[in-house]
Each structure stands twice: as structure tokens, then as C-alpha cells.
Amino acid sequence: MSQIPILVHMQLHFLRDFLEHIEKGVAVEWASLGKRAENGEFEDYGDYERAMDYPLFRMDFGARAVYYELNALLESELQSLAAPIWHSRRPQATLKQSKLRTIHDLSVGEVVELLESKYGIERNNFPGWDAYEELRRRVNAFKHRRGMRRFEDMKNNPDTGGIEIRYKATFDEARNFLSDIKTLLDNLYALAESKKVDA
């Protein structure tokens, strides 16, 4: 049975529903554009391509929105799981300083290190962590580099024979990320719960 808090379950459900809604809307519009093309409503192929840009942009933006929100949700939950560890370990002197640090002031790496030290895990060997790393890599590429891959992340595309230099956001990948991140959260919350029982 899943240990994920109900509010997190709901957010995952709403993200999946949003994705399905956008995907259905794009599919309906593509079908409509196809019919219009068959009926000769576009003077040339360029007009048809320009009309296709609108659903293509909605697909891209909709999938990216799921990436962003899913990444933010997971990082918030990592902070939530690490907060009790942080509060138990932070120096008392911090409380006397004029500028208090909270769990939200820590980097993602520092938050993960707290979880690793508390639960005796290694992120690279934890089920689902590789999906989070890939999601985070893509979110940062879209946010900071308009989707451009770093050199070490470029790869050959067997379908085109070319080099993929830019990430693309797709409905299929968004769906996979939703599933993989839910699995990661299930594993993290199950581990946290088991450690409570052991304590």
C-alpha cells in the first residue's frame, strides 16, 4: 500500500488529468486540420504547416508544464522528508543568528545528502532516482538553455541518423515521468515509514 500523502496523490492525479486533457485537445485539433486539408481549405502546404504550429506548441508547452510541476512537487517532498532530519541536526547557534536557515535554503544536493545519511541509501542505487535525474536535467535545460543539451548529453538519433542537440517535451515522456516519479515517492515514503517503525 502506498505511503504517499493524500495531497501528493491528488497533485499527481491532477497532473495526469491535465496531461490527458491537453493530449485529447491536440488530437482533436490535428484531426480537424487533417479534414480541412482533405477538403482543400489550405492554399498550399505552408499554410497547413503554419496551422499545425498551434497544436504542436500546445503539446510542447503542456508536456513541459507537467515536467516543471512534477519536478517541483518531488523536490518539495524531498524537503518535507528531510525537514525533521534538518531540524534535529542544525546547530543551536543557528537559532541565535539574525538570518535563519530553513530546509528551503538548502540546495537539492544538501537535502538529498540528509536523506542518504539518515536512511543509509545511495541515490544512484535507489529505485526511481535515475528518472528524477533525467527529469531534472530536462527541466534545467528548458529553463536555462531553451532545451539545448549539454555536450555530454548529446546522442545519436537512430531514427534520423543525426545528433540530438535539443531536448523535446512529449506526452509519452511526461506520462512516463509521472509513473516513475510516483514510484520514487512510493519508495521514499515506504522507507521513511519503515525507519519510523524500526526506531
Image (cartoon, rainbow, N blue to C red):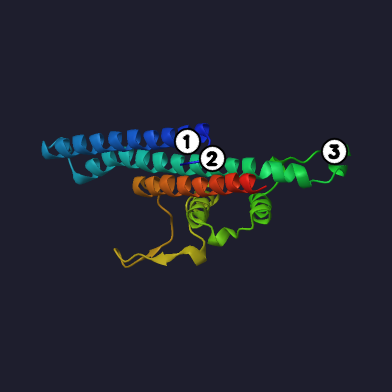
**Nearest the camera: 75 or 152?**
75
Instruction: Residue 60: name its quadrant.
Output: top left
- Which residue is at a point 27% across and 41% down the rendered structure image? 52
Q: Mark 2 against mark 1, which lies toward the viewer?
A: 1
> Do labels 3 and 1 touch, CB within 8 Å?
no
User: Which residue is painted at 47% across and 35% down in the image?
Assistant: 9
Q: Callout 2: helix, strand or loop? A: helix
Q: Estimate the x, y position of residue 71 in percent, counting from the top left.
A: 52, 44
Q: Is residue 58 left or right of residue 110?
A: left
Indicate the amino acid at tag 3: Leu
Q: Is residue 137 or residue 82 the one in the foreground? A: 82
Tag of residue 9: 1
User: In 3D space, how far apart are the residues under numbered discs 3 and 1 (Cα atoms)?
Assistant: 34 Å
The disc labelled 1 sits on which kind of residue? His
The numbered mark at residue 73 is 2
- Snapshot quadrant of residue 42: top left
Mark sitting earlier along the chain (2/3)? 2
* Residue situated in front as seen by the camera: 183 or 14: 183
State the mark number for residue 95: 3
Q: Amino acid at mark 2?
A: Leu
| Spot occupied by residue 172 in the image (x, y as percentages of width and height) | 34, 48
**Within-10-Å neighbours for mark 1: few <14, some 14–19, many 20+:** some
Picture residue at 35% right of the left edge, 45% below the top: 171
Q: Earlier in the sequence, mark 2 or mark 1?
A: 1
- Residue 194 in percent (x, y) is at 58, 47
Front position in the image: 141 or 137 = 137
